[in-house]
């Protein structure tokens, strides 16, 4: 299936000069959605990735991370932006183009030795995924891989990630 044809390009969003890859058109397509989750699952199985938890990065990582966790027989854990999680949290700050941002996870969600796969819809510069990796590694988890639907190759985000399998389904 031509997944790329289901991704919509939106010029100048959220700022002038940025070409946004919109996955809502892929999500609303029943066959596209099913194929995406099945393909991601297949690639994890081919890479012999076995996990205790799939970690989804807010917010589009939740959409793909939870069905993947279901398919892999794993649990799902959300990593959220500052102030959204109700119980005690671990957090990590990371650099943005202007300023910093923060990602958080519940303290009792992950433990030393938990095998985790980090999922997001898209990797661009790698900043978000790299910060999430540092967060789970700080806790002592075993990071077994990353899964993305889209990878923007030119930005070389994967160069900033730890040396574990990195799965992506569509490349630009
Ligand atoms: P990075 O930290 O790798 O530079 O950016 C990746 C993060 O920004 C992801 O959480 C992703 O959801 C979001 N993002 C950046 N650009 C796009 C885009 O063009 N389309 C979508 N769907 N998400 C984007």
Image: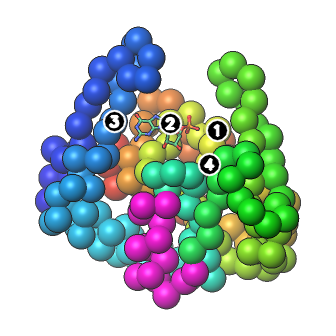
Q: Is residue 9 left or right of residue 140?
A: left
Asked if the residue at label 4 sits under 8 Å from ligand 1, the reply is yes
List the residue tagged with mark 3. 21
Q: Give the mark nearest the N terminus, 3 or 4.
A: 3
Residue that mark 2 sits on: 124
Label 1 element class: helix
> Does the numbered disc 3 mark a residue whose Cβ is under 8 Å from ligand 1?
yes
Q: Position of residue 11 (x, y in %)?
A: 30, 20
Give the distance between the C-alpha atoms of the residues marked 1 and 3, in whole angstroms: 17 Å
Rendered position, 142 above or below 94 = below
> Which residue is tagged 4?
129
Q: Is residue 83 left or right of residue 7?
A: right
Taking depth in this image into account, of 18 and 4 the one nearest to the observer is: 18
Position of 36 with respect to 122 (left or right) is left
Label 2 lies in ligand 1 vicinity (Cβ under 8 Å): yes
Provide the secondary structure element on which disc 2 rests: loop
Q: Could you tell me if the residues under marks 4 and 1 are in contact, i.e. CB atoms within 8 Å?
A: yes
**Rendered view: 123 above or below 86:** above
Q: Which residues are magenta?
A: 62-75
Q: Main secondary structure of the magenta part?
A: helix
Judge the density around disc 2: few (<14), some (14-19), many (≥20) Cα neighbours within 10 Å.
Answer: some
Is the C-beta separation of discs 2 and 1 under 8 Å? Answer: yes
């Amino acid at each position: 299936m031509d997944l790329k044809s289901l991704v919509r390009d939106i010029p100048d969003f959220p700022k002038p000069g940025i070409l946004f890859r919109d996955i809502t058109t892929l999500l609303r397509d029943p066959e596209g959605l099913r194929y995406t989750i099945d393909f991601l699952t297949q690639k994890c199985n081919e890479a012999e990735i076995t996990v205790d938890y799939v970690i989804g990065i807010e917010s589009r990582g939740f959409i793909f991370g939870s069905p993947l966790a279901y398919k892999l027989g794993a649990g799902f854990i959300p990593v959220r932006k500052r102030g959204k999680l109700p119980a005690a949290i671990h957090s990590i700050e990371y650099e943005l183009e202007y300023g910093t941002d923060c990602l958080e996870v519940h303290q009792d969600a992950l433990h030393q030795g938990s095998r985790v796969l980090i999922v997001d819809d898209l990797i661009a510069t790698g900043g978000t995924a790299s910060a999430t990796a540092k967060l789970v590694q700080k806790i002592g988890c075993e990071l077994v891989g990353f899964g993305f639907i889209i990878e923007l190759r030119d930005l070389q985000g994967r160069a900033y990630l730890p040396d574990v399998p990195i799965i992506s389904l569509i490349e630009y």
